[in-house]
Image: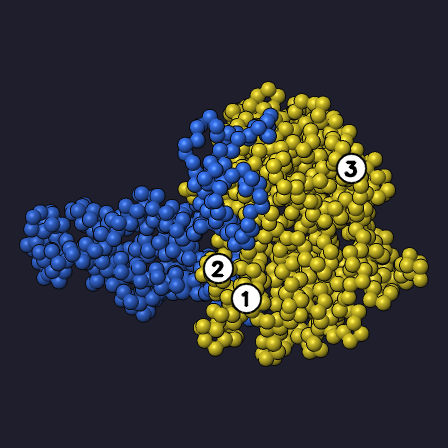
Chain colours: A blue, B yellow
Amino acid sequence: MKKEVKKSVQELESPVVDLKVKPGDVDTEPDLERPMGRKYPQARSIMPEKQLFEFAEYKPQDAERIGYSNYSYWKSVWANFLKKKSAVVMACVFVLLFIFTFVASAIGKYDIHMAPDPTNRAFIFPNGEFWFGTNSIGQDYWAQVWYATRASILLAVTVSVCQVALGVIIGLVWGYVRKLDRFFTELYNLIDNIPTIIYMTLIALMVGKSMLTMGIAMVGFGWLATARNVRNLVFMYRDREYNLASRCLGTKLHRILFRNIFPYLVSVIILRLALAIPGTIAYETTLTYLGLMDIMVPSLGNLLAAARAIFPRAAYTLWFPATIVSVITITFYLVGNAFSDACDPRNHV
Amino acid sequence: MSDRTAEAISAGMSAQIEEMRKNVDFEAKARKILSQKPLLSARNVVVTFSLRGNKLTAIRRTSLDLYEGETLAIVGESGSGKSVFTKCFVGMLDKNGSITSGSIMYEGQDLTQLNEKGWLNIRGKKIAMVTQDPMTSLNPLKTIGKQIQESVELHRGMKGKEAREEVYRILEAVGIPDPKRRYRQYPHEFSGGMRQRVVIAIAVACRPQILICDEPTTALDVTIQAQILDLIRRLQKEQNMSIIYITHDLGVVANVADRVAVMYAGQIIEIGMANEVFFHPLHPYTCALLSALPQLGVKGEKLPAIDGTPPNLFNKIEGDAFAPRNRRALNIDFLEEPPSYEATATHMVKSWLQDPRAPKVELPTAIQRLAEKTENKGTDPNAKHPHMDPNRETLIEVKDLQVTFGSGRKKFVAVDHVNFEIYKGETFALVGESGSGKTTIGRAIVRINPVTNGEVFFRGEKVSGKISKEMDEKVIRSMQMIFQDPMASLNERAKVDYIVSEGLINYHLYKDEHERQDKVQKALSEVGLLPEFSSRFPHEFSGGQRQRIGIARSLIMEPQFIVADEPISALDVSIRAQVLNLLNDLKKSRGLTYLFIAHDLSVVRFISDRIAVIHKGRIVELAEAEELFFHPLHPYTKALLSAVPNPNPYVERNKKLLVYDPSVHHYENDAPVWTEILPDHFVYGNEPELDGYRKELNL
């Protein structure tokens, strides 16, 4: 014991624990009955008793340091998301599906632009030659289905991203700038009170049914829901003290919106995006079904509409696109929900 | 009770306190407690929470005895585990927490072993709880009568008319007038204080043996708080309950507690009779906490602040948890957890300083002052205040300020006819209760809230209403604001570097990136933070550190005038002194002028040169700080002063509460005016009232 007298105060930072102490000697329970008779073998192994009861050096940095937490919001979100196995699996399935749409066209035996031959090749059941069979005019259904999937996904993603982006920008301004609240509210009411399908019909009949026109039209009406959602959220953050502080410091409007408020909405925006994609696919299917879309470009909606007409004769023409639509829809719902759960700080336990 | 403690107390005490001591006999209470068996006895309780994949030990082997008919106050900072510990007594721990070892014996059964069915006979019936926010503990869709009746019917087996009569009786008992009408009302028809009375009524409706009050007055104004404390004390006497009172406010403790337990980092580190803990604290933390009280500070001197922040319980705590913040820690404090030492039969402390081998430490001077002080005497009568200077320079002038919100029928006048001047170099305090419009005035000056009527001048130039762009920039660069809630006033999604340099970026007040970073580092070190903090996010910091980041953010603009909107009221007790010291240091080093907005008069007295008292949007009295404390004139000021908690238990328990009743004013025929009744002492009143005030002052 005496040899350790020279141990300096600095070594206290990483106390050497003497494990040779007999377990019976270590008194872990504070004993109310005999506080004076307590033994402290661990401390005595580091410095002699006399030094133990001397004043220690005071380090202000240590006093500041003890309060830290190493919690990170986005790390916890990610960890929580990964815990939802079903969502992770479905997300992988979707990514593979999308990649496969490119591969499938390459490995298929026939081209999408295959010449129709309704008399000889119509309604062939799936076989080694035509993996998904043929459609009513004798084209290879494999090529059709995968081309349509790719087209639908691309359309859905583009339209959703555009409408969510537009919705977020309008929602931010709508929510934050008090003077514009009335204007946007009236605009919202004006557009929202008439069923969108009526607008769509008018546009399709007057401007045209091309993919581009209809895509723009979908964005033109799709931002409404996102904008209102964002506006309501901005209301929550608008009068928080850190925004007042920014105003005190003379921060410009656009910087307040994008540095102070936008980061808080990211989780909601991703959720909306995830739900907008299957929504757009379903919407596109509806529009095609109603004959408001260009039927020359194959899309999942087109295939489903066509398959419905010939369903009793060739059920397989319905099953293939229907399965793919289901997979995409379920994926995005699962991923979206898992993500919104993961974003809720109450679940970060 | 040892002679030593008794002597130490009586030595410095005046005859007035002797008188007060007779009314509050702690010795008799101590004898009563020692003769009893504990009602509830917690032994070596350990509570752990699993949080974000980590294990957090919130309560680290803590024991506590509760005796019949006593009021035990548990004091601690946020995160010290005081709420968690008492939630164990009613089986209301959050779902991710559990009692991992220890026992809580009550009526011969161990509460830690109870199942949900067993709890039904204890919770609410024998051990009841009152929580902080009355709005969340009441059902907004049910009349309050029904809510109390539910409790009566469920726990006391009364039915129908009998139960209803009982509810009337209880409502009356908790001081709610006209119970028959009130029975049919909904929670939103009650004010905050009345709502808390209803919550207390529900809790005591079934005559519990133990009542746990978890910060029941923290959300209330000082005057209402004093009334609720009175009520709790009266109910305890009537029903002979044992009360556990959880709070962070030492003034409240002095008011209610027979016994005080101090908690730190999940342990009770000191427990004793109120007089023992207040006048003869033994643990370094208790000493530090008491001496950091602004009430005991000397104006113009630094408060003895506690550095740093409470420990993060995710980390393993070795030795005495307070050691890293303790300026006079022993070597052994870092190595071994101290045992419990018994100073007197009722006074236990967990500190190595009590060991016979430890050096003797003297009681801090501030605590000696506490024992000597009878009432809040002037701290420094000869202090030089900027407004007394004949060449004083007016920095801010507010003329007939009116701010309204809404329009038409929903119009609400928040601030009306407010006049004052702030001189260069002074700290001007604005004191009032919640909703009085004090924050609105501060925000109107820095141009966050628009001014409806009247004008604000900065160095003689008008800054309210429409002003030029150059003037706007000038205002922003010379007037800044510090906010109340450090949790809400920093952008969580931005790094400290951006937060602090936001103002610099807006006006491009730097030559290059290097200079900007230089300025940020300088601002951070000026407020006592390490420069390396700039690359972190706000959530990594504690409340006090965050508040200092907020101060750095406004300092970087090099303002001349700062509006400090309740800068310490959301902070932990041990942190408050740090921030007050910082504000005072900056005032000296930078020649700053403050508008200090607060609801707590004791803090204001320590920090400010002049005080304005505001009630319902009007300033009712304005005077030099000590003058206001010595000669309050307006009845509202008097009521506010009488409610200020005093950390001396004898004084606090003998204080006479004044209640302000606006109907004493008769302003119908004789309109009140804002009058300078003495030099630099303004009061709002009509002629007859002013005559009365003059008589009071012997003019």
Look at mark 1 in the image and give the residue it sits on. Answer: B523
Can the viewer see residue B140 in this picture?
no
Q: Is B115 on the left or on the right of A282, as rendered?
A: right
User: Same chain for marks 3 and 1?
Assistant: yes
Can the viewer see residue A156 in this picture?
yes
Assign a secondary structure to mark 3.
helix
Which kind of residue does numbered mark 2 sit on?
Answer: Phe
Label 2, residues with CA under 10 Å away: few <14, some 14-19, many ≥20: some
The quadrant in which the C terminus of chain A is found is top left
First in residue order: circle 3 vs circle 1: 3
Q: Quadrant of residue B342?
A: top right
Numbered badge on residue B7: 3
Numbered badge on residue B533: 2
Residue drawn at (60%, 25%), measured in percent from left and top? A33
Q: Nearer the viewer, residue A294 or B52?
A: B52
Q: Quadrant of residue B486?
A: bottom right
